[in-house]
Image (cartoon, rainbow, N blue to C red):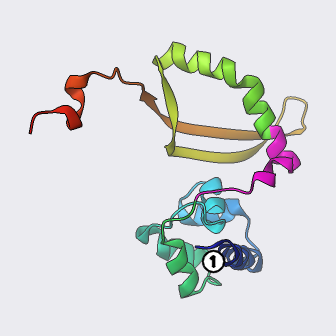
Amino acid sequence: MEGSRRAIAIRQLQDAKRLSGKSYNQIAEETGLTNVYVAQLLRRQAQLKPETVPKLRAALPQLLDDHIQEMMLPPMRCYDPCLIQEPTIYRLNEAVMHFGESIKEIVNEEFGDGIMSAIDFYCSVDKVKGVDGKDRVVITFDGKYLPYTEQKVEHMASRRPS
């Protein structure tokens, strides 16, 4: 999907959400998806699966058949490089960079040498009250652990005898 067509589709999807009067949390509850995944769907950053279509149609009846068909296509997962200038995104990036090395050390200590998948991954944003009674943001990254493999020639399919 080219840039301007993609932008139009995103605007139309966001309009459908706005017209519904529902929050991401409400749509998530009705569909069984996480609130962030709903947002990803409506920003064309995730692919709508066939089994979710009826639930999403019920939650957002303003969606047209064309919208649903577009959402079922594999998305172009990208972002505008200027996005980092948006304060919430800048602070989130800053937090990950500030705590990143410590998080990496704990992942390695708990799991071994590896990474957290961003494909087999769940994300949610929640609002809680802190001990001082003030609102707090809780962002959960729930990713599958992927260990690095030792690269032995005998395990390479491309090096096996035919």
Q: Nearer the viewer, residue 98 or 160?
A: 160
Asked whether, in this view, residue 89 is left or right of residue 150, the answer is: right
Residue 63 lies, in percent from the top left, at: 61, 82
Majority secondary structure in the magenta region: helix
Inspect the magenta stretch and tell me whether residue 31 lies in it: no
Q: Which image quadrant is residue 3 in? A: bottom right
Q: Residue furthest left?
A: 162
Q: Provide the residue span drawn in magenta.
A: 77-91
Q: Residue at x 33, y 23 (%)?
A: 151
Q: Quadrant of the C terminus?
A: top left
Image vertical order of residue 59 relative to residue 135, above or below: below
Q: Amino acid at mark 1?
A: Leu
Q: Quadrant of the N terminus?
A: bottom right
Q: Residues within 10 Å of mark 1 (few under 14, many from 20)?
A: many
Residue 50 lies, in percent from the top left, at: 42, 71
Q: Nearer the viewer, residue 28 or 99?
A: 99
Q: Residue at x 64, y 47 (%)?
A: 124
Asked whether, in this view, residue 54 is left or right of residue 10, the answer is: left
Q: Residue at x 61, y 66 (%)?
A: 44
Residue underneath mark 1: 60
